[in-house]
Image: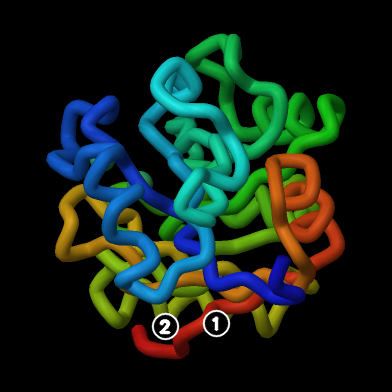
Amino acid sequence: MKNSMIMDLHVHTTISKCSKLTLEEILDNAAIQGLDGVCITDHDTMDVRHRIDEGIQANGLCVIFGMEYATPDGDFLLFGPFEYLEPGLDARQLLQMVDNKGGVAIAAHPFRPGRSVSEFAVREGLCSVVERVNGRNKPEANEQTLEWFDRYDLAASGGSDAHSLEELGRTPSRILAPIAGRADFIEALKAGLIEPATHLT
Ligand SMILES: [Zn+2]
Ligand SMILES: [Zn+2]
């Protein structure tokens, strides 16, 4: 296993109604896009678990299951035992629950107009990983995240937010640890062993 891994942390399959990117396309094309792993983060569901097994696939790709959870205070990428998570939690309830269950949350595209994340989530230490670079954001929305990195002690991630094959792998993260499954991944993020693999915005 590699000591550091290039991973796309934010990928939607067709399980998300807004995505046309199939799971098969992800599995077949991730390595071509330079990825060692992908996190499947469908909107409000981890149903991808019914389609494939999590972890290292036959072709060597590391696949981690998470989800993108929408709250009135912004969207969060969640990793942990959240297969049966109730909908409708607000950000404070959600992030406290994530911590209690040993999971980790990433504030997704926090400055995207209309889908921004409320600053209290990072100010109050409820969320310590922030999506520094999102492949679907306008450059300004990625740049604005720097305000938070100046102000708070945060780890930075990158993710494509792919909803189509062209977007897959666009702005990945480098995980500074070997990753074989969800537990390794969560531990690495909690330890801040992550950085955007590209500084493109
Ligand atoms: Zn979507
Ligand atoms: Zn997304």
**Disc 1 target residue:** 146
| Quarter of the image with the C terminus in it | bottom left
Spot occupied by residue 28 in the image (x, y as percentages of width and height): 29, 53
Asked if one can make out residue 132 in the rendered structure from this viewpoint, the answer is: yes
Spot occupied by residue 108 in the image (x, y as percentages of width and height): 47, 53
Spot occupied by residue 99 in the image (x, y as percentages of width and height): 82, 35
**Disc 2 target residue:** 143
Residue 96 occupies quadrant: top right
Disc 2/disc 1 C-alpha distance (Å):
6 Å
| Residue drawn at the location 57% of the way across and 19% of the way down | 89
Do the residues bearing badges 2 and 1 touch, measured as CB atoms within 8 Å? yes
Q: Secondary structure at mark 1?
A: helix
Q: How is the image coloured?
A: rainbow
| Residue drawn at the location 76% of the way across and 25% of the way down | 97
Q: Is residue 102 above or below residue 86?
A: below
Left or right relative to 38: residue 94: right
Q: Is residue 61 above or below residue 182?
A: below
